[in-house]
Amino acid sequence: MKRFNLVILADHVIGYRIAKFLSHRPDANILKIYTNEPRQESWWTPLSNYEGLSAVCAYYRTNEQLYEEIKSLPIDLILALSWKHYLTPRLLSLPMVGNVNLHYSLLPKHRGVYPVNWAIIQGERETGVTLHWMDEKFDAGDIIAQRTVELNPWDTSFDLLQRLDEAALPLFSQLWEQVAEWKQLAKRQSGSASYHSREQFHALDELDLEAEMKIGDLINLLRGKSFPPAEKQIFFRDRTTGSKIFVSIELRPERL
């Protein structure tokens, strides 16, 4: 049995869950886990606080720092789990087997940042999780596996994220049994592709009070922007003072 040497780039709840799963596997050897420094408003517990993982955890600051700290390690796989930073080509060149990303959409739809939010904003009826090989293009590598998750009309982006977390762990744990075959399992991405940038997402932060919008599109926008700290996700401006007035939405489905 081959034991895979891993560098894990992880954040949020799913990063902890998968790292914890791998820490108990005899065929996985975690060399290092990198995570982001927690912000005051963070809605997740930092990985460095979890028992059993803190000894191998370090904070990510730059790609240069990351490269210098891991370049001499005998890495088989880099696993990017809910990771928001672009990896440079020389980082991608370090592992002997390759780099794998867990992305929260059904690629090639919603490449880039905030894929959970965009699925709601654009009125999708389903989305999902994708495990794929990484290359130099953003979220464009060959797909190892996907799992579909249906959207509820009352889902906020935070609700949906939690359900995607629940889908991602069993998908990953089942696939890990075939980790030596991931190259053979992978298929090229096909279908209609879309990409979203951070700038595109934040361009929707301010509501134009003069704009015309369908009610359904407005509800989807508010649902897609409902994410901790939700009270400052979307706003319009007071016509007199110019100050921001923040908007949120509460959805309560009827229980039949």
Image (tube, helix red, strand yellow):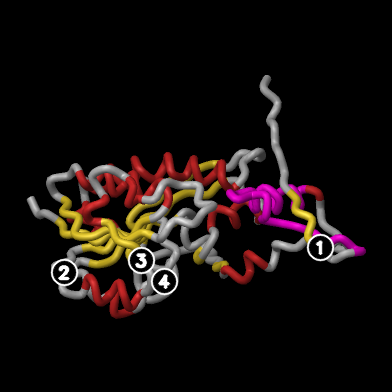
Badge 1 element? loop
Residue type (three-letter) at the residue carrying disc 3:
Tyr
Q: Nearer the viewer, mark 3 or mark 4?
A: 3
The residue at the point 49 percent across, 42 percent down is 162
Judging depth in this view, the residue of 151 and 207 nearest the camera is: 207
N-terminal of the pair, mark 3 or mark 4, is: 3
Label 3 – label 1 distance at C-alpha: 35 Å
Query: What residue occupies the far left of the structure in this picture?
Result: 1
Residue type (three-letter) at the residue carrying disc 2:
Leu
Q: Nearer the viewer, mark 3 or mark 1?
A: 1
In the image, taking residue 207 as reference, residue 68 lies left or right, namely left
Q: Find residue 70 and report its image quarter.
A: bottom left
> What residue sits right under mark 1 in the picture?
243
Residue 239, magenta (yes or no): yes
Judging depth in this view, the residue of 159 and 172 nearest the camera is: 159
N-terminal of the pair, mark 2 or mark 4, is: 2
Label 2 – label 1 distance at C-alpha: 51 Å
Q: Badge 3: how crowded within 10 Å, few (<14), some, or many (20+)?
A: some
Badge 2 element? loop
Image coords of residue 188 (percent x, y): 37, 65
> What residue sits right under mark 4 in the picture?
86
Q: Quadrant of the C terminus?
A: top right
Image coords of residue 138 (percent x, y): 44, 71
> What residue sits right under mark 2 in the picture?
73
Label 3 – label 2 distance at C-alpha: 17 Å
Badge 4 element? loop
Question: Which region of the structure is painted magenta?
Answer: 216-240
Q: Nearer the viewer, mark 2 or mark 1?
A: 1
